[in-house]
């Protein structure tokens, strides 16, 4: 079976045009400062109660904003100053120093089912604002994703630890009932 050249060239041209358009759109978005915040998502096979408790534990070192709705699964932290960290990291890369840098995290927790199992989707987005010049004001910049990935990893570990604790408690309760049955049987 041979592929004709006349059927390949229109598809190649279409993919080339779409690639150029998307590349130009992302370059324009970066130059204007469109939406630099990326959302990192992970799905955990657990119940919603356990996931929310893990998110609360993982965000314990942050102060929560007034717009946080724990029952709805929406967490927003207050802005934290990270000017010194941004200046030390960007000075190694040869970037300009910042007058002010701050960030906050938005975490969304939503429950559902996957192949009949309880699952929870946790999404984390970091909003990083920096000010390089007094006249410029604060501008959002794209994050490197380390903070978001670290938070998702920590939530995953907390979920795994809590599930292991619950399993061992259930196993102990099952063992105690077996021992009681053995004592009462003749």
Image: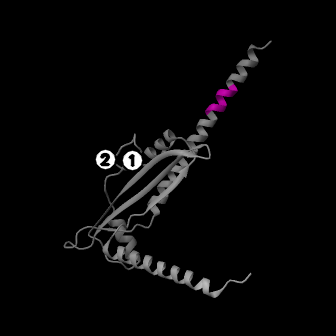
Residue 128: quarter of image: bottom left
Q: Position of residue 62 (x, y in %)?
A: 37, 50
Judge from the rendering whether residue 57 lies leftward or rightward of residue 8; answer left or right: left
Q: Nearer the viewer, residue 31 or 168?
A: 31
Judge from the rendering whether residue 49 lies leftward or rightward of residue 102; answer left or right: right
Q: Which residue is mark 2?
A: 67
Residue density around tag 1, few if under 14, some if 14–19, many if 20 or more, within 10 Å: some
Kindly state the secondary structure of the residue where label 1 is placed: strand
The quarter of the image holding the C terminus is top right
Query: Which residue sits furthest right?
Result: 186
> What residue do we see at 39% from left, 42% from top?
70
Kindly check if marks 2 and 1 are in contact, taking CB atoms under 8 A apart as contact: yes
The quarter of the image holding the N terminus is bottom right
Query: Which residue sits furthest bottom?
Result: 5
Residue 182: quarter of image: top right
> What residue do we see at 46% from left, 63% from top?
146
> What residue do we see at 38% from left, 48% from top?
75
Q: Which residue is mark 1?
A: 74
Q: Nearer the viewer, residue 139 or 8?
A: 8
Is 170 contained in the magenta span? yes
Q: Position of residue 100 (x, y in %)?
A: 27, 66
> What residue do we see at 64% from left, 27% from top?
173
Residue at mark 2 to residue at mark 1: CA–CA distance: 8 Å
Mark 2 vs mark 1: which is more N-terminal?
2
Kindly state the secondary structure of the residue where label 2 is placed: loop
Start-end of magenta stretch: 169-175
């Amino acid at each position: 079976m041979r592929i004709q050249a006349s059927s390949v060239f229109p598809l190649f041209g279409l993919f080339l045009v779409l690639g150029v358009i998307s590349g130009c759109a992302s370059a324009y978005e970066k130059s204007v400062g469109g939406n630099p915040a990326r959302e990192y998502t992970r799905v955990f096979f657990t119940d919603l109660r356990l996931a929310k408790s893990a998110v609360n534990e993982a965000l314990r070192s942050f102060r929560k904003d007034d717009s946080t709705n724990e029952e709805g699964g929406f967490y927003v932290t207050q802005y934290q100053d990270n000017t010194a960290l941004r200046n030390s990291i960007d000075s190694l890369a040869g970037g300009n120093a910042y007058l002010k840098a701050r960030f906050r995290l938005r975490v969304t927790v939503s429950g559902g089912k996957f192949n009949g199992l309880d699952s929870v989707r946790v999404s984390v987005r970091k909003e990083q604002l920096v000010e390089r010049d007094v006249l410029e004001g604060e501008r959002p910049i794209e994050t490197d994703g380390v903070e978001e990935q670290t938070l998702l990893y920590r939530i995953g570990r907390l979920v795994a630890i809590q599930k292991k604790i619950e399993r061992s408690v259930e196993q102990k309760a099952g063992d105690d009932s077996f021992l009681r049955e053995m004592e009462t049987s003749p």
